[in-house]
């Protein structure tokens, strides 16, 4: 029995070896070679300035981005300027003032005579 178990040991180890090697390589996510970022070139956005007398050529996406970004900001500003006033103060305050006036209860702030504004703040 002892002789048989010792003869099986190298076979089982050989059977597990490829599986372990596969498992080791399976979990290597970011194992590429070479630089992991663009090396600094010394130019703004890595773009060389155009030769004297020539104009910079825009990429195809740049005009779309400008119109979309600044047009979106302008549209948002217009919508926010003309949006309806739905605050609580705009609809509840006039109703509360009307009800308090009808009931005869004082609701306006009246400063003390010693405040310097006995008739109220101008």
Image (spheres, rainbow, N blue to C red):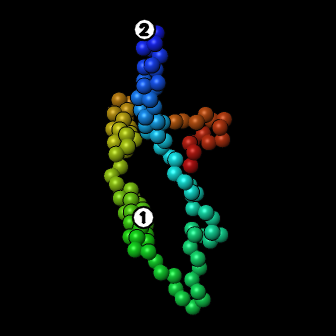
- Distance, label 2 to label 1, CA atoms, is 80 Å
In the rendered image, residue 46, in percent from the top left (x then y), is placed at: 57, 69
In the rendered image, residue 73, in percent from the top left (x then y), is placed at: 42, 62
Q: Quadrant of the N terminus?
A: top left
Q: Which residue is mark 1?
A: 69
Residue 48 visible in the displayed image: yes
Q: Residues within 10 Å of mark 1 (few under 14, many from 20)?
A: few
Image vertical order of residue 5 relative to residue 110, above or below: above
Of residue 72 and residue 98, the one placed in the foreground of this image is 72
Image vertical order of residue 40 relative to residue 112, above or below: below
Image position of 45 (left or right of 15): right
Image position of 49 (left or right of 13): right
In the rendered image, residue 76, in percent from the top left (x then y), is placed at: 39, 59
> Which element carries disc 1, helix, strand or loop?
helix
Residue 63 visible in the displayed image: no
- Residue at image location 42% in from the left, 14% down from the top: 4
Q: Residues within 10 Å of mark 2 (few under 14, many from 20)?
A: few
Which of the numbered marks, if any, corresponds to residue 1? Answer: 2
Q: What is the quadrant of residue 12 in the picture?
A: top left
- Residue at image location 37% in from the left, 32% down from the top: 100
In the rendered image, residue 108, in percent from the top left (x then y), is placed at: 47, 36
Residue extending farthest to the front is 3
Residue extending farthest to the bottom is 53
Q: What is the quadrant of residue 40 in the picture?
A: bottom right
Numbered label tally:
2
> Which element carries disc 2, helix, strand or loop?
loop
């Amino acid at each position: 029995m002892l002789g048989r178990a010792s003869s099986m040991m190298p076979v089982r180890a050989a059977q597990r070896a490829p599986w372990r090697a596969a498992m080791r390589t399976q979990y290597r996510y970011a194992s590429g070679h070479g630089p992991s970022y663009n090396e600094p070139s010394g130019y703004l956005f890595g773009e060389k300035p155009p030769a004297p007398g020539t104009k910079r050529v825009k990429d195809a996406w740049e005009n779309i981005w400008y119109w979309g970004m600044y047009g979106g900001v302008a549209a948002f500003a217009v919508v926010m300027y003309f949006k309806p006033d739905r605050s609580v103060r705009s609809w509840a305050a006039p109703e509360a003032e009307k009800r308090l006036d009808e009931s005869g209860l004082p609701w306006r702030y009246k400063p003390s005579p010693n405040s310097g504004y006995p008739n109220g703040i101008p």
